C-alpha cells in the first residue's frame, strides 16, 4: 500500500527488529534513510535489497518533495541509523510534508534507547520527560536544568561518553538529591545500568571512563517533607483558624 512507513530498527541487538518491520522492508519500493551505508548493512543482514535514498531533515526541500511524491504512489520506508526515526533523528519534516500532501503515514514501533533506558533504570515512570541530547556547552546545560528543575517527572537525556562526567558534575551541583541512572550500551554485549547519586556516579566514571552509547536518566525532584515541629505548628495554626467558625456554629 502506498505511503510513508516509519520503521524502528535495532539499537545494538539485531534480534530486536520486529516481524512487522521486516515484512514492510521486504514489501516496500524504496527506503529513505539517514546513512545509506548503515541501512545497507542492516538490509543485507536481513537479505533484502531495495533502492536507498539518503534523507535527513537538512538534505533540503527538494529531496523531501521527491520522497513525498514517491510515497503518494509507492510504499516508502523511513529508517534512521538506529532506533526509532524522528526521536533525536531525522524525519520530522518529512512526516509533516507527507501529511501536508495527503500521503498516508504509518508508524511501526520498535527499539528506542530512551524507553529501553527508562524501563531498565528502575526510576519512577508514571511521568517522564524526554529532553533529547544534553547540551554540550556548560551554560546551555545549566539553563536547561534550571528550566526543568520543577518538572515532577523522570527526565531522560541522550548523552555522549566523553561528556558524561562533566554532566554528572553539573547534576551533582544543581540537583544533588535526585536519583540518577546511567544506561549504557543498551541491548549490546556490555549493557550496563548504574544507579546512584550524580556525585557517586561522577566518582565512578572518573575512575572508569565510560565507553559507548549512553542514556542518562534523573528521577523526579525529591518531595520536601515537613518535620515533626512544622507539623505541630501547622496543626496549631489550623485549629486557630477553625475556632471562629466553630464558635459561630455553636
Ligand atoms: N532514534 C534513536 C532512538 O530511538 O533511540 C536515538 C538516536 S540518537 C542520534 C543517538 C543517541 O541515542 C546516542 O547518542 C545515545 O545517547 C542513545 N542511544 C542509542 N543507542 C543506544 C544504546 N544502545 N544504548 C544507550 N544509548 C543509546
Image (spheres, grey):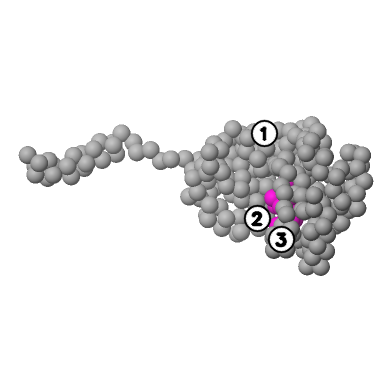
The residue sitting at 78% across, 67% down in the picture is 61
Residue 227 percent location from the top left of the image: 34, 36
- Give the crowd class for mark 2: few <14, some 14-19, many >=20 residues within 10 Å: some
Which residue sits at x=25%, y=36%? Answer: 232
User: Gap in Å between the C-alphas at discs 3 and 2?
Assistant: 36 Å
Rendering coords of residue 198 (x, y %)? 58, 41
N-terminal label among 3 and 1: 3
Residue named by callout 2: 135
- Local secondary structure at mark 3: loop
Dot 1 falls on a residue whose secondary structure is: strand
Which label lies toward us, 3 or 1? 3
Q: Is residue 14 left or right of residue 249?
A: right
The crowding category of the residue bearing disc 3, from other C-alpha atoms within 10 Å (few below 14, some 14 to 19, many at least 20), is few
- Measure how far apart labels 1 and 2 are at the Cα level: 22 Å
Q: Nearer the viewer, residue 167 or 13?
A: 13
- Residue occupying the point 81% across, 68% down: 62
Find residue 193 and name its label: 1
Observer-side mark, 3 or 2, equals 3
Q: Does 100 appear in magenta?
A: no
Quarter location, residue 63? bottom right
Q: Is residue 211 visible?
A: no
Placement of the C terminus among the 4 image quadrants: top left
Q: Position of residue 38 (x, y in %)?
A: 86, 48
Query: Which residue lies under the disc numbered 3?
Result: 102
Give the magenta part as a residue range.
84-92
Amino acid at each position: 500500500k502506498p505511503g510513508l512507513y516509519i520503521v524502528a530498527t535495532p539499537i545494538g541487538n539485531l534480534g530486536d527488529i520486529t516481524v512487522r518491520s521486516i515484512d514492510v522492508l521486504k514489501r516496500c519500493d524504496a527506503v529513505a534513510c539517514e546513512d545509506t551505508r548503515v541501512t545497507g548493512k542492516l538490509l543485507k543482514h536481513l537479505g533484502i535489497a531495495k533502492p536507498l535514498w539518503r534523507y535527513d531533515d537538512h538534505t533540503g526541500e527538494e529531496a523531501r518533495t521527491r520522497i513525498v511524491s514517491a510515497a503518494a504512489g509507492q510504499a516508502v520506508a523511513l529508517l534512521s541509523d538506529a532506533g526509532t526515526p524522528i526521536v533525536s533523528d531525522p524525519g520530522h519534516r518529512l512526516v509533516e510534508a507527507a501529511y501536508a500532501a495527503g500521503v498516508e503515514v504509518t508508524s511501526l514501533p520498535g527499539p528506542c534507547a530512551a524507553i529501553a533506558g527508562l524501563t531498565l533504570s528502575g526510576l519512577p515512570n508514571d511521568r517522564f520527560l524526554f529532553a533529547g541530547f544534553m547540551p554540550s556547552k556548560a551554560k546551555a546545560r545549566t539553563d536547561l536544568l534550571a528550566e526543568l528543575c520543577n518538572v515532577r517527572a523522570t527526565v531522560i537525556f541522550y548523552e555522549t561518553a566523553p561528556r558524561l562526567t562533566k554532566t554528572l558534575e553539573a547534576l551533582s551541583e544543581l540537583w544533588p538529591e535526585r536519583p540518577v541512572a546511567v544506561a549504557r550500551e543498551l541491548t549490546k554485549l556490555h549493557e550496563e545500568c548504574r544507579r546512584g547519586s550524580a556525585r557517586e556516579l561522577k566518582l565512578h566514571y572518573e575512575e572508569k571512563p565510560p565507553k559507548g552509547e549512553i542514556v542518562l536518566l534523573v528521577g523526579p525532584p525529591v518531595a520536601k517533607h515537613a518535620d515533626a515541629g512544622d507539623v505541630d505548628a501547622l496543626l496549631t495554626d489550623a485549629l486557630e483558624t477553625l475556632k471562629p467558625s466553630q464558635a459561630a456554629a455553636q
